[in-house]
Amino acid sequence: MSVSGVHRVNFRPQRLITALRVVIGAFLAAFGVVLFLSFGKKEEQAVRIHLAPPPTQSGEQVVDLSENFAITGTKGGRDSFRLQADQVTGFVGDKKLLRGVRLEVYGEDGEHLALKGSTGQFDMAEKRAQLSGAVRVEGKNGFALTTPSLYFDGDRDILFTPDEIAFASRGLSGTGRGLNYLTGDRSFKIPAEVRVTVEPVKPGDPPALITSSDMTLSLDTNEVVFNDSVRLSRGQESFSGNYLKLTLDADRHRLISVKAYGQIQATLVTGKAAAPTSLQADTLLAAFQPDGKSLDRVEAYGSCQLESSGVQGTGETLLAEVPQDRILLRGEPVVLDSRSRIAGDVKTSFRARPVGTAGGASPSYFTNGEPIFFQASRLSVEDGGEIARFSGSVRGWQGDDSIQAEEVVLRFGEKSMNAFRNVFCRFTSQEAAADAPGKGPPVPTLIVASAMNYAEGEGTVHFRDSVKLTRQDSTVLSDRMHVSLTDPAVGRRRVVRVLAEGGVHFTHLANSGSADRLVFLPDQDLAEMQQDAGLAEVVDRTSGRTLRGRTLKFDMKGNRVLTETSDGGRTWITLNPKDKEAPDLEPKIGH
C-alpha cells in the first residue's frame, strides 16, 4: 500500500478556540459598557469612579491591581473623594480589600477631611468605603476624630459609624457612641453616650463638663447643641434639661449665651456673695459677661421657680440682671422665705411672727406680729433675695395701717423701707385704745409726701418734699417731717411724736400758725412751734387775734396756746372764747 507524501492539518480546534475568545471578549465588552452606564442613575449628580493604575515601566494595562491602589470619585464636575491604598489584597465580587488606606473627602468649597485606617474595603457598586483599625479623621479648625471603624457613602456624602468615637475641635473635646458626619456642611452628630469638655480660658479654672444622649456640632460655627437628658456642670454651677444650645466665642473657650428647653433645673452662682441659686423653668435664656464665667442676664419662661439664700420665688416669667442682683418675676409671682410671702400683681404677704421672736423685725414700719400685705403691678427681687422692689400703684397694708406709692423698696437685711412718688401713709391708734375708758374709736394719722425712708434700728419714718400730715381737725404742712413710732415688739405701730421742719404751717379748726419747726405729740394733743429768727405765731381766724413768741405750745383739746413772757413767765391763752372782747386769761404758771 502506497502512502501519500502530503500531510493534512486539522484547524477545527483552533477555530473553536478563536471563536470562544471572541465571544468572551464581546461579553466582557458588553459588561463593561453596562457597568459604565449604570453609574449616575441613582441621582442627578452621581459619583463616578476612576481607577488609577499603578505606574509601570512597560506601560502595559494592569488587570489585577495589587499595590498603589487609587480611586477618584467626581460629582457635578468636581472631585468628591479620593481613595488610596498601599496594597490590594484581592477581589470579593465588587469589593476590594485594602491595606494602608487613605481617604480624602472634598466639600463644595474645596475644604476636605483626611481619613486614615490600617485596613479597609471599597464596594464599586455601592460607592461605599470602609476604614478600620485605629481610624483617624482630621479636618478644619483643628478637628480630629478617632474610632475603630468608619464608613463613607459617596452617594450621600456622609461618614458614619456605630462604634465609639473620640474627638477634639478648637476648645472642645469629647467622646460618644456613633457618628453621622455630613461632608457638605461639615457638621456631625453623635447619637449616643455623649461626654464633652469645654476647656476654660485660664488654666486652673473649672471646665464645663456636659453629658447628653446626642450632640450636634458644626465645624464652621461656634454653636453646640445637646439633646435628651442633658447634664452640665462647671464648678458649683450645674444644669439639666432636655435641650441645651451653647454659643461659644471664636476660640470655643468662653460661653457667650445659653438656650435651653424642657424641665430645666439649674444651679447658678449669683449675687455679691457668690451664693448658689437654684432655678427651675420650661425655657431658659442666659447671656454671659465677657469673661465667659459670670452670668450677665438670665431669662426664664414657664413655671419658674427660684431659690437663693433661703428665699423662694415663683412666677410664669423671670428676668435676672445678675450684676445688679435684681430679679423680676411676672405672672402671679410669689416670693417666699421664713419671714414673708410676696405675691406680686395680686397680693404680697409677709408672714406673721410671734412678738419677741428673734430676727422678727419687719423690713417695713409695720409690726411683725401680724401678716403684712403688698399689692403692685411689678415685683423684682435683688441681691440674692435680700431686696424686694415693688413698682406700679403699690399698696401695702396691715389691718387699717397702710402705705401707697409708685415704688416701694424693702431691704430685709437692713430692715428698712423706701417709698417714692405720691407717697401716702396711714397710721391708726392701737385697737385697745378704743376699749379704754373715755376713749373713742382709733384715730388715723394721714401723711402725704413725695418720698419717705425708714430704718428699723432708728424707729423713725422720714418724709420729704411737700409733706402734709392730717389728724382729726389738725393739719401740718412742711418741707420735711420725721415721725417716731412705737416699738414693734409691743404691737401695731402708732405715731408718738412728729417733728416737722422747714416752712411749717399748722392749722387746727379756725386757728393757724407758722414756724420753722413744729413738734407734735398726738397722744397729748399738743403741738409746739419754734422759730429760730423772729417769732412763731398763731392766728385765730374767727377773731383775728394773733399770738407770737419764740416758742408757742398749742393745746388742741383745750383750744389754747401757752406763751412765754420776756421774764420767762408762761401764760395759757384760750382762743375763740365766748366773749371775744375780753381775753380769757388763765392764771400764770411760774417757772
Image (spheres, rainbow, N blue to C red):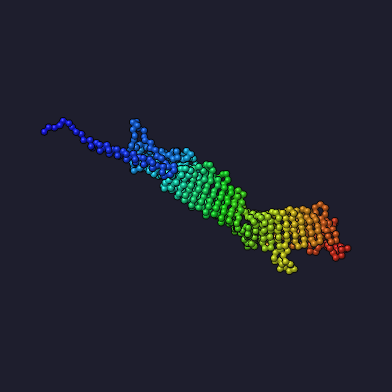
Residue 446 spot, x, y in % from top left? 73, 60
Which one is in front, 548 or 134? Answer: 134
Q: Residue at x 48, y 52 (%)?
A: 228
Quick one: quadrant of the N terminus? top left
Quadrant (top left, top right, bottom left, bottom right) of the C terminus: bottom right
Residue 562 in the image, given as x and y percentages of width and height: 82, 60
Q: Is residue 566 visible?
A: yes
Name the residue: 71% across, 68% down.
435
Residue nearest the viewer, comparing 294 with 491: 294
Classify residue 591 as left or right of residue 117.
Answer: right
- Residue nearer the viewer, 531 or 465: 465
Extreme residue toward the right, this view: 581
Residue that appears at 81% across and 63% down = 559
Horizontally, residue 445 falls left or right of residue 53, namely right
Confirm whether residue 200 shows in the render.
Answer: no
Quadrant in which residue 566 is drawn? bottom right
- Counting the numbered discs, the total is 0
* Residue 240, image x, y percentages: 51, 52
Residue shown at 65% from the left, 58% from the top: 375
Residue 347 placement (x, y as % from top left): 63, 60
